[in-house]
Structures are given as structure tokens and as C-alpha cells.
Image: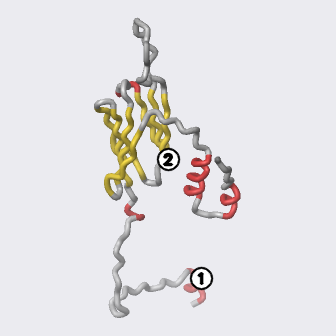
Amino acid sequence: MRTAFDVSPLFRSSIGFDHVLSALEAARRVEPIDAWPAYDILKSSEDAYRITMAVAGFTEDDLTLIQERNTLVVSGRKPAAAEDSGHYLHRGIAGHAFQRRFELADHVKVAGAALKHGLLTIELKRELPDAMKPHRIAITTDRARPTVEAKPSAAEKLAA
């Protein structure tokens, strides 16, 4: 059973949380679950992730990876080719087009992708800007505290 949750009232009363609310809104719009192609998501370190997708039968030219803002779209489409001569008794290797979307957190970028033995491996890395990284703040005593001399404004100079 699926319940609908409307987050639009939160947009009116929240400031600075729009990326979280947008993620909730995107989760609400999730398409029906499609189990193909199968994939794994691995957190390989504090700031590194790996997505591995089983894309048997697809080549590098058949696959497209696009990162737009906080969304990674992986799609595959085989070119229209002449059908194999003969009649399939069973066709279990999927070859139809697909598109899989992954919502990425802020500052997560695709570091690389490789296709080997029918597995597409996508490396992701979170790269925080220097301004967002923790930094040490020096503590000074009153004697060593730098002084800032206030310069008189133009109005104060005229009044004197």
C-alpha cells in the first residue's frame, strides 16, 4: 500500500532546506520498480561510492551516463540491427532499452566509469569545497588579540 505525502506546504515555511525537500519530492515521483538491470551500491570509504550494474550484451557505445545537478542517469540502447537468423526457443538475456536514475547528494561527482565482463562500474566521490571542510580556529589571549583601529567616517571628519 502506498500513501501520498504532499511536501509542498513545507516549501512555504522552510528556508535553506530546499535540497532536502526536493529529494523528498523526487522520492515521491519514483517510477514503478523495474528490476532490470540489476545493480549494487557500495560505500567503499567515507567519501567514495561505487555503483555496479549488470548490463550483459551492451557495449560502451550502447551506454550513456549523464550527470545533471544531483541526478545520475544511466541509459542503454542497442542500435537497431538485423535480427539473428533463426527462431529463439527461449530469450532470457534482456536487450531492450533501459534508463536508471540515481539521486546524488550535494557535492557527489562521478569520478569514472568502466565496463568489464558485462558489469558497468561507476565510481562516485564526494568532494566538499574547502569552505565546508572543518578548519581549526586559533585561540588568542587578550594581550595577543589583534586590534582593529576604527577609521573615522567622512561625516565624523566634517563634524570635527
Q: Amino acid at mark 1?
A: Ala
Q: Amino acid at mark 2?
A: Glu
Secondary element under disc 2, as helix, strand or loop, is: strand
Residue 14 location, quadrant: bottom right
> Which residue is at the far front?
89
Pointer 1: residues within 10 angstroms few (<14), some, or many (20+)?
A: few
As rendered, which of 37 and 67 lies closer to the eye?
Answer: 37
Q: Residue 52, percent across and down?
A: 36, 40
> Which residue is at the far top?
85
The residue at which mark 2 appears reads as 103
As rendered, which of 49 and 147 lies closer to the eye?
Answer: 49
Q: CA distance from mark 2 to mark 1?
A: 55 Å
- Using the image, determine if residue 143 lies above or below residue 43: below
As rendered, which of 131 and 29 lies closer to the eye?
Answer: 29
> Which residue is at the far bottom?
143
Point out the image quarter for the C terminus.
Answer: bottom right
| Label disc, if present, on residue 60 of the rendered structure | none
Residue pictured at 50% horizontal, 40% vertical: 101
As rendered, which of 139 and 102 lies closer to the eye?
Answer: 102
Q: Residue 37, percent across and down?
A: 44, 33
Q: Residue 144, percent across and down?
A: 33, 89
Residue pictured at 57% horizontal, 86% vertical: 156
- Using the image, determine if residue 89 lies above or below residue 143: above
Upstream in the sequence, badge 2 or badge 1?
A: 2
The residue at which mark 1 appears reads as 155
Residue 90 location, quadrant: top left
- Using the image, determine if residue 150 lies above or below residue 118: below
Secondary element under disc 1, as helix, strand or loop, is: helix
Q: How many labels sit on residues?
A: 2
